[in-house]
Structures are given as structure tokens and as C-alpha cells.
Image (tube, rainbow, N blue to C red):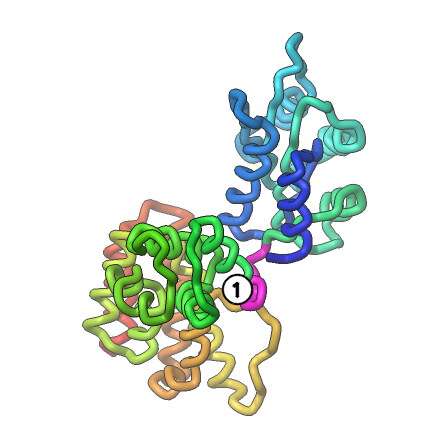
Amino acid sequence: MNSSITKLMSSLKSGVVEPIYLFQGNDKFLQKFLSEKIADTFFESGKRDKTLLIPEEMKGDEIIHQLTATDLFSSKKLFILLEPKKLKGNIRKEFLAYCDNPISSTCLIIILEDFGYNVAMVRELTKRFQAINVSSPFIYDMKKWTQYFLKQNGIKANSAAINKITELAGDSVGHVANEIDKISIMLEEGQELSEDVIEQFSGWKREHQRWEFFKALGNKDLDNSLKIGLSLITKNENMISLIYPLTAFYQELLFRKISPKTPPARGAYIPLSESVKKNLPNYLRNYSRDEIELALSLLGEIDLRSKTTTIFDETEMSKFIFKLLTR
């Protein structure tokens, strides 16, 4: 985990809760996970009073009223504010005034997915608070998260096992956490987790996972792409959650197809597991440029439909695979 999250976790462990936190980044699992950690410390064992503030669904003056309202008992309240940049005019001034002088009995978590300093609200908030980075981690930090969740579940693991979990499930922190939860159920008390144990009965064998789906697509294996893709849809994922990594997958292939002599940029985050990224050169041999561009076009159409109408995940998945792999 990055230094800002490490600092937060250490502070919470000491029982310290700040009146305002600024999260910056778009990893939904980390946003929720850290918000829950703050709530655990803030409310201790008492009643939880949590409110989600969404400018698109609430009037600005209602948000300000929620933040500034007090009661006779000074009850603790926790607020989570999404999309603060949508607060405009006088409401924005009132909100920033609250940030400068927050109520002691409340805790406000501001979730800011933008990093662009040219956005006024980003400038104002990052001047006032040290942002906690909740972007999806790079591989080094993902290993730290793997170690963290193993420790939380009381699982002893050797370095090969840690590397294996990170390689197979490290496309997101949430994926790592989910797989370790499943492993903890299967392990006997006191049993050490090794690479062999993972291969023997972990979730990657019991249920299909993203990396298997991308492997099938990369190899243009129609039957397995359909089987695994539909299995993912019915068990763990939906089409909307898969559009982002699928788009990244085909964008990477397109970049390598267009610029074969240009090495991939190091340090850039790609929402794909290490096993998939390692095999991109092999998958590239199976696709023409036209086929890659078709995949991206189909994904764009699905994304547009998902925002304008109700989509049926199994239908969208089947159509995408058939149109792409039966040309």
C-alpha cells in the first residue's frame, strides 16, 4: 500500500480520526475499504450514522445543511461526499468555508477522482488537505496489499505464494481481497499457504477468473471465451465492470501493433493481471489490426448502450465474443 494509506492506517490504529479526509483516485474498492476503516475507529462500538452526499442527486444547500446541522447531544456523524467539483457558486464557497472550520462531532470523507490541477475544486481541496491516494496500485504496492490481507486472515504464506496470488489476481485490490477470503475458507488451521496449495484448490481452479477469460480471448478460443465469459457474468462480474479492463487489453494490443519497435511505457498502470500482461506479445500474433479495432468499437458501443438503456449482460457478452471471433 502507498505511503498515504500506510499513514492513515497507522493513525487509525492509534485511535486518531481527522474531521476531514480527502481521497483522490478512482479505485472503488479502496474508497469503500478505507471509508469503513475510518468509520470503525470513528464510531468505535456505538451507533453508526453515515450519509452519502451526491451533488447530482441533492441540492447544494441540502448538502451544506446536512454538514452543518447539529443536535443537542452532539451525535457523531460521518459523511461521504462524491464529485465535490459539481458544487458551484455560493455553495462551493460555503463548502470550502466548512472545510476550513469543520464541526468536531462529524467526519467528512471527500472522494475526488480527478487529478487535474486546472479544476478549481481540485486546487482548493489539495491546498487544504494531504490527499490519500486511492488509485489502483502498481505491482509493488499490490504485493503489500496481498501481504496485508493474508495477515488479516491469519494466513502464513511463503514468497512464492505471495507472488502467485499477486500475479493471478493483482488486477485490482478487491480481486486480491476476494481470492484471499476464499483461500482462508479452504485452508486448514495452521496450514501454510504455498504455490502448490494455490494450484491445488484455490479459487482460480474452482471458479473461472478474469485472467482465464483474457487468456481465452487472447488465443481466440471461441468455446472457452464463451464458457468463461458467461461464467464470470453469472458469478462475479457484470459487463460494465469488464469494459474497462477489456478496453485496456485491446488498446495495449493496438499500441503494440501500431508501434512494434516502441517498448511499453514502464510504470503506467494497466488494469490487467501480470500473467495477462506477460502474454500480450503472444496474443498479439493472433490478431490483425482490423480485429483489434473492431473489438474496441464493439466495447465502445456496449459502453454507450449501458449509459442510455438497460443492457442484459449475458447477451452483450455473447454478441461481443461472436462478432469478434467468428469473422
Q: Is residue 58 left or right of residue 150?
A: right
Which residue is nearer to you in this view: 268 or 141? 141
On the question of residue 35 being in view, the answer is yes
Q: Residue at x 54, y 21 (%)?
A: 46
Counting from the top left corner in percent of width and height, residue 307 is at 42, 48
Which residue is nearer to you in this view: 234 or 195? 195
Counting from the top left corner in percent of width and height, residue 318 is at 24, 62
Give the secondary structure at mark 1. Answer: helix
Q: Quadrant of the C terminus?
A: bottom left
Judge whether residue 108 is colored magenta.
no
Q: Residue furthest bottom?
A: 261
According to the picture, the residue beneath numbered tag 1 turns out to be: 143
Counting from the top left corner in percent of width and height, residue 269 is at 56, 67
Q: Which segment did they paint magenta?
A: 135-141
Q: Residue at x 56, y 33 (%)?
A: 39
On the question of residue 247 being in view, the answer is no
